[in-house]
Amino acid sequence: MIGQRSLWAESASRLLDNPAALVSLAVLAILVIAAVIGPLVSPHQSEVLDWSMMGAGPDLRSGHWMGTDRLGRDLLVRTLEGMRISLAIAVAAAILSLVLGTLWGAVAGYAGGRVDSLMMRGVDVLFAMPTLFFVILLTTLFSRSPFLLVACIGLTGWLTVARVVRSETLALSSREFIEASVACGAGPAGVVFRHLVPNLAGTVVTYATLLIPQMILVESFLSFLGIGVQEPASSLGNLIAEGAAELDAAPWMLIGPAVCLVLLVFCFNYLGDGLRDALDPRRRR
Amino acid sequence: MSALLQATEIVVNYPLGGGWPRRRVLRALRGVSLAVAKGETVGVVGESGCGKSSLARVLLGLVEADSGQVSLDGVAIEHGRHGSLLALRRRVQMVFQDPRGSLDPRRTIRESVAEPLQCLRPELAASQRQALVMSTLDQVGLGRELAQRYPHELSGGQCQRAGIARAIVAGPACLVCDEPVSALDLSIQGQIVNLLADLRQQLGLAVIFISHNLAVVRHLCDRVLVMHLGEVVEEGTTEEVLTSPRHPYTRLLLQSELTAEPGQPLPELPEGEPASPLSPPAGCGFVERCPVALDACRHEPPGVHEDPGGHLTRCHRWPPSTTSINSPATPLTTAALRPR
Amino acid sequence: MRLFEIRDLSIRFSTPEGAFDAVRGASIALSAGESLAIVGESGSGKSQMLLGALGLLASNGRVIAGSCIFAGHALDTGQARNPWLGRQIGYIPQDAMGCLTPHLRIGTQLCELLMRHRSLEADAARQQARELLAQVRLPDPESRLDLYPHELSGGQRQRVAIAAALAGQPAVLIADEPTTALDVTVQAQVVALLKGLQARRDLALVTVTHDLGVVAALGGRVVVMYAGQVVEEGRVEHVFRQPVHPYTAALLAARPSGRAGVEGRMRTIPGSPPQPGSIGTGCAFAARCPAVQADCDQPVPMRTGAGRQVRCHHPLDQQASRVSA
């Protein structure tokens, strides 16, 4: 006999049955924990220059496990801090995108008709603007800060979320249980919060895990170009930019941050795929 | 006999996308009237696309009629006013076709069944609500241990019982059932039909039973409406309509029914398909398939004939006396029908 | 000599929730010109049995035992695409819309089948396609060839699906729930069409359905399936008039009829079909059976006699069947 299990519980158990998703989850957990507490417990500090070890390669005895950069700063600490900043910016931007996109999409989808077309045409117009142009414009107008970066990345990411959520809402609205709820006397707010949002949550959670790696890449790209996170703060993007410049002399400067970036993006994508499969109602039987 | 729930001359058109500058519309209902008295069971039969599901949705206020009105206890429902719709839904509830699809997959059976109470009877305390939900689950024969389950953990029959529990929990006077058994297996259909019959008796419910299954309608209903292409083509007591049908479409429906009697020859049916509700013909909607069509049927919409017993027929051929001169070869009499 | 035969087929599905057997040792056999209806409720394994036998099983299903034999040749079962399908064996899937490509005209699709299966030239293929549509009694076949599937009604699409299955000039035609999605008025037309084709072309016709009315109208033999097993088999008129398995009897009694009158209650089968995976070794119907006895938890052998088969420890005799039906 099957015990009482909500769809969430079933999805979780399906996710844990998926080896790729499980490994990704573990790697992500390790990376995130390292990024958060690594710099705190490390004997080195990211902004302290080690005059005796400038541009030194990875060496376990010296304590610089991943080597140092040209200025003698410990690369391990800088990479962990860079990852922390990259992750923080990506997660913040993803949350901004999701909240804005979900609200916009759900309202447009459920309201339908003229409201829907008006709201979605707005999205179309914003989509037509080139992201890079947008960011360069904003960064030259305002002072460069991580908050501005979050705003820039988030404001371009929500458009896709809005589209995805709207189409999902449209599909849900035509389901009989939404109609049944209206027949039970539920008002629009009741329908949206009791039925639409919980049923959208699966899609949104999945989309979030696929959005974060995208955001990491955008942030790194902007930082690589020099319009993202500014020195002396590090992010994966500007670490890679520095590393790329020293590729011949000090390849470890590129390899460490690049591996971290690839691992992060890979694991988030695999986790997202796993979540999508676990939450997909078509796989339920 | 005063009507509990009444719909008068309901017209519903669904606008379809595209077709600019000429907007295409699907003419779902073309002036349908229906009345149900307290404790009465009215069947609505017809093929898919005849508008019977739209009619159910109009009765619940889920779809707004383009013209015509729905009234409850003689009071017209105003679609714009939430209070008016709530009053309607307190007295009229609906059982849906898809047992599992009509329950929110992320909510337990208890939560789904409690929803009408939260919306329609907010004055109840949580404990009263809980007690009412549980006693209703008993009433529909759903074990209390299933209350904490989710729809995907239940069988189709159990889900439909939950759907019925949700419909009756707030104490309605009328139940609109839209094909409540057509998605269920044969061995389960009877259980649900019996449950509806029991509840109707216990609670004194009026029932509007929409189905394409004539056998179930015959079993359950006092009166029958036969719908075709958004119109009621025949209406009367079940006995009269299903044993001595007057409209050729009703006869076609009855003939098409495949009985589980082996060795019976297959019915001789006219070839052809139902006309499209996108472009209903100018005259009678059934003319393309009608074996006894007259010339007038193509051009003029038939009027309604009502005999003293309340038997309504929308056909140029009825009453037969006026038309029998034109084509004596095919008199439309009930004697030609197979006894059923 | 049997033309088409499925022998002791068992199919296992593996799902995240565990493995279950959808079909448990089911057999059917039929000769040329014979009609066989397979009837059962949803989950009885009736469609899966055919899909497995024809090599059309979903990727998480596996044929764990049994075989399928066509004209003396063993077919590859499971997911193997078998070379007879579409040629000597015509298959009409459950979803008539799904088997037609939405962006190609009906004529193009039919011609393609004819050119592939019968090596016809384009002109001859079009001629044949028109012929096929006429055979399935689609009005005005010439102009229908140029329509897209969505421009046809449900009944017309079902006819086109039947025409497509006939393109390879099959000896066996297998129809999976051919009337389920159709309106009552069209159902009877499609049954009449299938029956006519079967007689005219001397086809072996296998029809899967849950509708007892369709079974009765088709005639021939019927196989009743329950919980992945064949529980009763025989000629339709014998099985319907005098069922020997309690499940068949209960199913026949449960069909709605006006006879009970408004006050009467419909006969039902208590309980619901067993969940796949929770079926023991004994009779799967025992839990719902009105005539259950102590030994019903023992494995049930198939009893054969006088053109009929039944899988029951205590088959209903003549008298008992009259009481319960």
Image: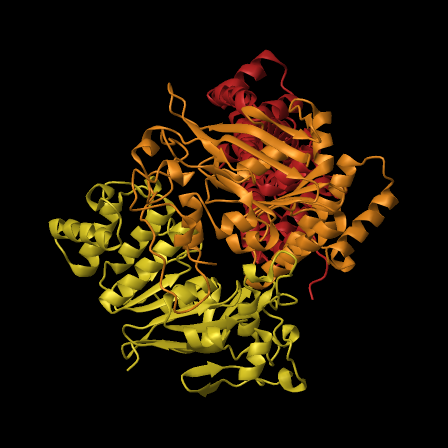
Chain colours: A red, B orange, C yellow
| Relative to C166, B180 lies left or right | right
Residue B22 position, x and y percent, is: 38, 20
Q: Identify the residue shown where x is 61% and y is 65%.
A: C267
- Quarter of the rendering containing residue A201: top right
- Quarter of the rendering containing residue A170: top right
Residue B194 position, x and y percent, is: 66, 58
Tell me if residue B226 comes above or below residue A232 in the rendering. Answer: below
Q: Can you name the residue that lies furthest to the top here?
A: A141
Residue B225 position, x and y percent, is: 53, 42
- Quarter of the rendering containing residue B207: top right
| Relative to C65, A214 lies left or right | right
Q: Of residues C183 and B261, which is closer to you in this image?
A: B261
| Relative to C148, A62 lies left or right | right
Q: Quadrant of the N terminus of chain B?
A: top right
Residue C222 position, x and y percent, is: 42, 72
Q: Identify the residue shown where x is 52% and y is 86%.
A: C301
Q: Of residues B257 and A80, which is closer to you in this image?
A: B257
Tell me if residue B151 comes above or below residue C232 in the rendering. Answer: above
Tell me if residue C263 comes above or below residue B113 in the rendering. Answer: below
| Relative to B117, C71 lies left or right | left
Q: Of residues B147 and B163, which is closer to you in this image?
A: B163
Number of numbered labels in the structure image: 0
| Residue C22 in view (yes/no) | yes
Q: Of residues B215 and B133, which is closer to you in this image?
A: B215
| Residue C95 in view (yes/no) | no
Tell me if residue B339 comes above or below residue C82 in the rendering. Answer: above
